[in-house]
Image: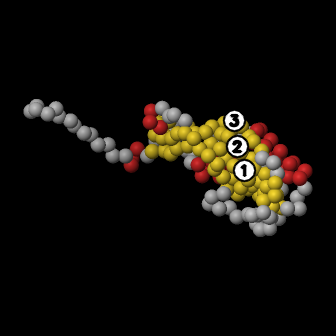
Amino acid sequence: MNTIDSILQTLAEYLASAPALREAAFVTEYPAGYKSYPLKKPTVSVGLKSLAMDAGSFGGYLGRDAATGNDIMGQQVKMEVLLSCYFPSETSGLDCYKLVTLLSQTLVDGCPVGGLSELTVEPIRYDSNTSACRADVTLRLKTVVGTQKDERLVEDFILIHRPSGGA
């Protein structure tokens, strides 16, 4: 079942495996994936920007896992993922643009973690904190996060209520 961390990790691994993006490095923000300093090649940091829960049915119960028989508990979410694209300062604007475009096309062709509903790109700018050029790409996804509940770990308690005044 998807957790927020696993969604971010899956995105980073998917993008890193794309042949069109082989010149870039992909890391997750937390746990901190280290970017080299100064940057030697384009580096994309994958992180959570926002999360909104959709109203769930049956108190978060999503069904039963066919393989394990465990209950699946979770929540449908609308998630914004921030892809912070850092480029060595000597990278041309055209090369920055090409990588952001290839990144966007790769995700449009097949986002591995849910329904991609929108993708926005911020203008390329210089980031003095990292001494690098930067462009942010925001993904809006609709997906499910949750866990499996192992029935062997659940203890059922039965409460018997007797009406007052009765024997």
On-image quarter of the N terminus: top right
Disc 1 designates what residue? 83
Q: Earlier in the sequence, mark 2 or mark 3?
A: 3
Which element type, helix, strand or loop, lies under badge 1?
strand
Q: Earlier in the sequence, mark 1 or mark 3?
A: 1
In the image, 150 versus 161, the foreground residue is 161
Question: Toward which corner of the image does residue 121 lie, by quadrant?
Answer: top right
On-image quarter of the C terminus: top left
Q: Earlier in the sequence, mark 1 or mark 2?
A: 1
Which element type, helix, strand or loop, lies under badge 3?
strand
The amino acid marked with disc number 1 is Leu
The amino acid marked with disc number 2 is Leu
Residue 78 in percent (x, y) is at 61, 39
Q: Which mark is residue 117?
A: 3
Residue in the picture at 47% in, 37% down: 60
Mark 1 and mark 3: span between their CA atoms? 15 Å
Q: Are marks 1 and 2 in contact (CB under 8 Å)?
A: yes
